[in-house]
Image (cartoon, rainbow, N blue to C red):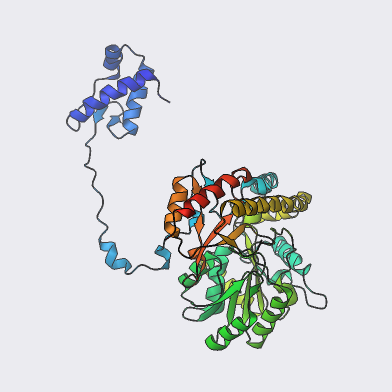
Amino acid sequence: MFDSSSDRIASELRAWSLAAPPGARLPSTRELVARYEASPVTVQKALRLLAAQGIVETRPGVGTFTRALRTARPGDCGWQTGALGSRGPLAQAPSAGLRAVPNDVIALHSGYPERELLPERLVRAALARASRGETAVDRAPSAGLPALQEWFASELAAATSAGLTAPAARDVVVVPGSQSALSTLFRALVGAGRPLVIESPTYWGALLAAAQVGVELIPVPSGPNGPDPEEVERAFAQSSARAFYAQPTYANPTGAQWSPGVVTGMLDIVRRHGAFLIEDDWARDFGITTDPAPVAGRDDAGHVIHLRSLTKSLSPAIRVAAIIARGPARDRILADVQAHAMYVSGVLQAAALDVVTQPGWSSHLRGLRPRLRSRRDLMVDAVQRHLPGAHLEAIPPGGLNLWLRLPDDTDLPRLARTCEERGVLIAPGGEWFPAEPPGCYLRLNYSGASPAAFDDAARIIGEALEGAAG
């Protein structure tokens, strides 16, 4: 930081330099010391500041000179319009949930838990240990660290029904986060131009990944207990699809969990059609009033492709997930991962494995459930008191979000703008639908902001909702 004397000298020299012709020589340091009655150190600080701003340049042994200042002119990138062609899925605006926000707003739009719900102490210690290990300098195997593969396999094996063959470590492919995994799965198992049955509403990232790959989406409506098996059967029969992407446990955005009957029906459908169920198990660790029961635990014939992410559970900085698949499908998946990501950082894999094998991990998960329940219930209470016009179809048994149906005449963009102006960020529900939304929806994350702010946030949303009627 420059002191006031150097700032004053720099200010006067800046004015002189900008008025002087390019290449004009500034007085020597000795002359400036005498002129300003300052120390050589203070004068040098002023000259370094001007040099950092690009106003002057110092030539050792010669002196300091003004630089030729170029007129700022934006570069002409118009040629790219023709080269890029029409706007593709990659160029679309990012999800509202990815917006960075200042600290003085109530952020109900994000899809991530706040730090107090993460095992921060375990994560920091694990990263420190991993940075000192061999994974800091070695290339990780393409399919993942063997010990981490074994952990993912054993976790699913513990949920596998008796009499079925449990997954093995070889069935596991470690990937850099679930978003990357979705692109891999859609490329490897579906392919461009081919149909994919998908729940509606569903995770916006899955919709984006599908658009990037170029698959044709076949949406089926999904409610608090999951989609209607008859609707899924009809979608498969009419489209000849060979894959169904779904979130059976605490779906994003609705928080829905498939009932046992729906699980049985879906397994019958994919078996009958010789198809895959891509099970996105992103919320395994966020149960509140029920326990997770992976659909993959009831299949040993390779119909269910299981995607298990640790990113939201551990830390946004640890983008580690796993795809568990059997047979030739696993080989295709690994080939795609090798082509697009090569391998996942060994340091991140080692840190993830360190966290989930610590005794403190189980303690963290036990403590997480009541904290999530408290947050969810506080948000439900605030919504019911301040948003009488909103309809909460079901209180989610797990996950991170409430899913609200708003009056059909709600102007959602106007509602979002008004809320933001008053310090509350919300996520309008349109981006979670693969086709036109059947109504106006709002997703509120009860894990991302301080619970103390829920009442104020709901009040602001309720007041904005009154003014957002069409």
Whether residue 137 can be seen here: no
- The vertical placement of 29 against 218, above or below, is above
Q: To which quarter of the image does residue 148 belong?
A: bottom right
**71 lies left or right of 360:** left
Asked whether 144 or 271 is in front, the reply is 271
Q: Residue at x 31, y 69 (%)?
A: 85
Where is the N terminus found, in terms of image quarters?
A: top left
In the orientation shown, which residue stands out farthest toward the right? 162
Whether residue 240 can be seen here: yes
**446 lies left or right of 77:** right
Tag count: 0
Q: Position of residue 420 (x, y in %)?
A: 46, 48
Asked whether 165 or 134 is in front, the reply is 165
Q: Residue at x 77, y 73 (%)?
A: 166
Where is the C terminus found, in terms of image quarters?
A: bottom left
Q: Position of residue 19 (x, y in %)?
A: 18, 28
**405 lies left or right of 211:** right
**370 lies left or right of 21:** right
Asked whether 255 or 440 is in front, the reply is 440
Q: To which quarter of the image does residue 341 belong?
A: bottom right
Asked whether 309 or 109 is in front, the reply is 109
- The vertical placement of 385 against 239, above or below, is above
Q: Residue at x 28, y 17 (%)?
A: 32
Q: Position of residue 48 (x, y in %)?
A: 35, 28
Q: Position of residue 86 (x, y in %)?
A: 33, 69
